[in-house]
Image (spheres, helix red, strand yellow):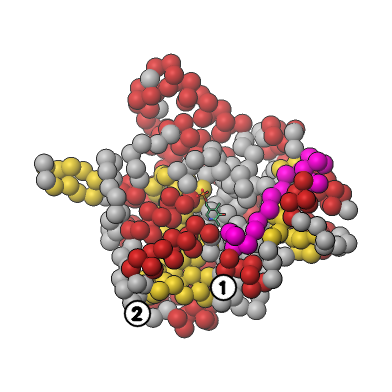
């Protein structure tokens, strides 16, 4: 398969492939050496000359991380806030949006667990109501139903682009067309799509987008980012502000800073942020369209082979499918499947109904096995999983 990615090179750049067939990129990817080396080098420098001094010494590289992350999603550097996780990004965005009694929030069946809990909690506090837009017959969010429910009293549309426990890619760009027409803010959880798909915030039409570093982007744990468009940022003030997010202009006054920096907290791991920048640069050098093409092809190949494996049922739905492949095995608990394939040197993971209450219940599922290859995955590695299952 030649899709424009030099498989030998990306595997040489990934020391983990010598140890395991890692099909858990939706949990946390194997990092390229450049990411680990960047993080470790900065930690060493902090130990040698002092943390503030090491930061000052790499000031330009620290600043450049915003540009790298912005390029990844086709945004501007001042539209990026660096935070410690996708959850932190989503929460600071959501909590900055005004929400009043009687207003409605629209979301879909695939909404991520932490977002769903946050939405429920906010509704309980404010008297706003949460409405679930049903899926269409293909298992993606139903655009007609969404359009019909997008009235003046809708405060927000919150959508998960690719869920954590299913193969669907929701039609986010089509949702963006509808929210723009209605003038309703659109908060997209792109945690599983950034680093896997060529995510373009303008094409998607989202106002706010949350992502993490450690999954398909292959960055360090404890990193994440928020994209907030210039237009919406001007209207939002986060409920908690501090050094960096606001300026203390006199003993009794303060001003929120321009741009997305208002969504950050001041203290962070500079080493990890540099590692995030290195991960973004690495993905950009390979090219997101090429990454998207290869991940999609590998996942499709895996689904086809699984569908032909006796006793295995593929559980993915949707018109468009991602690099996340979910399945069940007749008469076997998901944890036992995971343990069996782990013994054959293959990492997969398990997703349970406890993190997919809106989705799995109506589909009669309680748990699935999740296999998530990446562009550095080889055909041999997929075969290792299939052999272990047979
Ligand atoms: C993992 C995940 C998150 C949370 O990311 P964190 O960085 O752990 O906060 C959010 N949304 C989706 C769809 C995820 O898969």
On residue 46, the disc is none
Residue 40 vertical placement versus 264 (above, below): above
Q: Is disc 1 surrounded by few (<14), some (14 to 19) or many (20+) residues within 10 Å?
A: many
**Residue at horizontal 47 percent and vertical 24 percent from the top:** 43
Q: Which residue is mark 1?
A: 141
Q: Is residue 269 left or right of residue 218?
A: left
**Residue at horizontal 29 percent and vertical 54 percent from the top:** 239
Residue 89 or residue 329, whichever sits in front? 329
Was residue 344 drawn as part of the magenta stretch in this picture?
A: yes
Q: Is residue 270 left or right of residue 38?
A: left
Furthest toward the top, the residue is: 48
Res. 14 visible in picture = yes
Q: Which residue is mark 2?
A: 152
Q: Earlier in the sequence, mark 2 or mark 1?
A: 1
Q: Position of residue 236 (x, y in %)?
A: 29, 59
Q: Which range is magenta?
A: 340-356
Furthest toward the left, the residue is: 251
Was residue 380 drawn as part of the magenta stretch in this picture?
A: no
């Amino acid at each position: 398969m030649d899709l424009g990615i030099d498989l030998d090179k990306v595997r040489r750049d990934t020391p983990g492939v010598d140890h395991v067939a890692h099909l858990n990129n939706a949990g946390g990817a194997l990092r390229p050496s450049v990411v680990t080396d960047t993080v470790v080098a900065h930690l060493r420098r902090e130990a040698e000359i002092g943390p503030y001094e090491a930061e000052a010494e790499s000031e330009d590289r620290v600043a450049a991380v915003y540009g790298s992350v912005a390029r990844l999603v086709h945004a501007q550097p001042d539209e990026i806030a660096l935070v410690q996780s996708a959850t932190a990004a989503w929460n600071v965005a959501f909590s900055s949006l005004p929400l009043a009694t009687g207003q409605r929030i629209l979301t879909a069946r695939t909404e991520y667990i932490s977002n769903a809990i946050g939405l429920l909690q906010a509704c309980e506090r404010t008297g706003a109501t949460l409405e679930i837009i049903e899926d269409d017959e293909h298992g993606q969010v139903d655009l007609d139903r969404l359009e019909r429910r997008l009235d003046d009293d809708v405060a927000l549309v919150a959508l998960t682009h690719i869920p954590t426990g299913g193969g669907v890619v929701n039609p986010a760009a089509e949702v963006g067309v509808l929210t723009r027409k209605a003038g309703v803010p659109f908060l997209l959880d792109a945690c599983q799509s950034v680093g896997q798909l060529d995510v373009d915030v303008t094409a998607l039409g989202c106002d706010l987008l949350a992502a993490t570093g450690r999954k398909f982007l292959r960055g360090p744990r404890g990193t994440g980012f928020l994209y907030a468009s210039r237009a919406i940022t001007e209207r939002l003030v986060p409920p908690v502000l501090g050094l960096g997010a606001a300026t203390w202009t006199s003993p009794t006054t303060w001003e929120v800073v321009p741009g997305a920096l208002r969504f950050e907290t001041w203290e962070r791991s500079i080493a990890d942020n540099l590692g995030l920048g290195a991960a973004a640069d690495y993905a950009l050098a390979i090219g997101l369209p090429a990454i998207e093409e290869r991940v999609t092809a590998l996942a499709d190949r895996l689904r086809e082979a699984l569908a032909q494996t006796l006793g295995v049922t593929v559980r993915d739905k949707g018109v468009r499918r991602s690099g996340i492949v979910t399945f069940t095995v007749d008469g076997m608990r998901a944890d036992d499947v995971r343990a069996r394939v782990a013994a054959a040197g293959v990492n997969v993971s398990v997703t349970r109904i406890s993190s997919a209450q809106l989705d799995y219940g109506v589909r009669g599922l309680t748990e699935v096995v999740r296999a998530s290859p990446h562009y550095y995955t080889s055909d041999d590695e997929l075969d290792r999983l299939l052999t272990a299952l047979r």
